Image (spheres, rainbow, N blue to C red):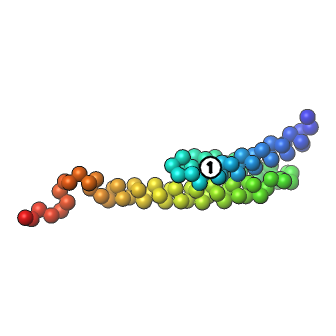
């Protein structure tokens, strides 16, 4: 097969993979690795876009948008949960600062 055609096919497949990973990046809990994979794939596809026109460019763009939103949102949720767990006394009924009767 022609090398140009092979490169274009790989670029199109990468754009579609970026889109799918970006959508999966919006899922709670398991989305963070998919969002990272989407951004990684988008970077590799972007390098190839400089040589060839990408017909699936909007899919790559939406994949990056979804991945970025997913990463920001889920990292904020994880940070809030971690902060809340660190700030609380764990609900163990231990000493909470008041020793009076």
For the point 68% across and 48% down, which residue is it?
A: 20
Residue 43 at x, y = what percent? 71, 51
Quarter containing the C terminus: bottom left
For the point 44% across and 57% down, which residue is it?
A: 79
Name the residue at the left extreme: 101
Name the residue at the right extreme: 2
Residue ID for mark 1: 24
Residue 55 at x, y = what percent? 84, 53
Quarter containing the N terminus: top right
Residue 40 at x, y = what percent? 66, 48
For the point 18% across and 62% down, which residue is it?
A: 97
Name the residue at the top extreme: 1
Q: Is residue 1 left or right of residue 42?
A: right
For the point 80% across and 47% down, which residue is it?
A: 12
Q: Is residue 51 visible?
A: yes
Q: Is residue 69 left or right of residue 62?
A: left
Query: 59 or 68, which is in the foreground?
Result: 59
């Amino acid at each position: 097969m022609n090398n140009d055609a092979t490169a274009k096919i790989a670029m199109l497949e990468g754009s579609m993979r970026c889109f799918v990973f970006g959508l999966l990046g919006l899922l709670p809990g398991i989305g963070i690795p998919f969002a990272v994979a989407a951004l990684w794939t988008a970077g590799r596809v972007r390098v190839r876009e400089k040589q060839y026109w990408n017909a699936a460019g909007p899919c790559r763009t939406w994949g990056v948008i979804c991945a970025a939103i997913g990463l920001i949102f889920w990292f904020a949720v994880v940070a809030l949960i971690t902060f809340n767990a660190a700030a609380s006394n764990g609900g163990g009924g231990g000493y909470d600062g008041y020793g009076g009767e």
